[in-house]
Amino acid sequence: MNGSPITWLLSLMLLFLASEAGLFEPKVHVLIYNDLQNGTDLTIHCKSKNDDLGVHLLTYRNDYEFKFRPSILLDTWFYCSMQWNGTMHWFDIYTSKRDTCTFCLWNVRPEGPCLVEYKKVTCYSWNTNA
């Protein structure tokens, strides 16, 4: 009985289990934390080539998070504009070619965002408009 509903259902279940077991690219969890000074609110707007995640207001010491499954072609790219006190900056919050994290914690500071990984903090400058 090729193509029976049970065979089809079992195939879907195996595909789901393989995906969750990490046989495909694992999901990436990005968390952006407002680490600005003096209780400053942060407005962020993150996008990719295919997704607009909308505008979010982060009060001081609060966060915004999103999850996605990166492309196996290593071309996944999310960038965020960030505004506070009348200034606007932007940064590539995730690029497949740079980032290897599956849980990417970003502390947003006035001088730039910092990626916090196990026993390691890497700070970056804001992107330029060039």
Image (tube, rainbow, N blue to C red):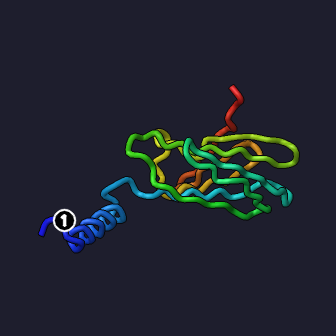
Q: Residue at x 62, y 46 (%)?
A: 47
**Label 1 belongs to which residue?**
3
Residue 118 can be seen in this image: no
Residue under the image location 48 percent in, 52 percent down: 101
- Residue visible at 73% across and 54% down? 55
The N terminus lies in quadrant: bottom left
The x and y percentages for residue 70 are 45, 49
Q: Is disc 1 surrounded by few (<14), some (14 to 19) or many (20+) residues within 10 Å? A: few
Left or right of residue 76: residue 47? right
Q: Quadrant of the C terminus?
A: top right
The answer to whether residue 23 of the structure is visible from this angle is yes
Instruction: Kindly give the residue lying farthest to the bottom in the view shown.
Output: 6
Q: Amino acid at mark 1?
A: Gly
Q: Secondary structure at mark 1?
A: loop
Q: Nearer the viewer, residue 63 or 53?
A: 53
Q: Quadrant of residue 48?
A: top right
Could you say where residue 105 lies in the image, as x and y percent from the top left?
59, 57
In the rendering, at what x and y percent does residue 17 appear? Answer: 31, 67
47 and 63: which one is in front? 47
Q: Is residue 121 left or right of residue 54?
A: left
Residue 30 vs 72, above or below: the answer is below
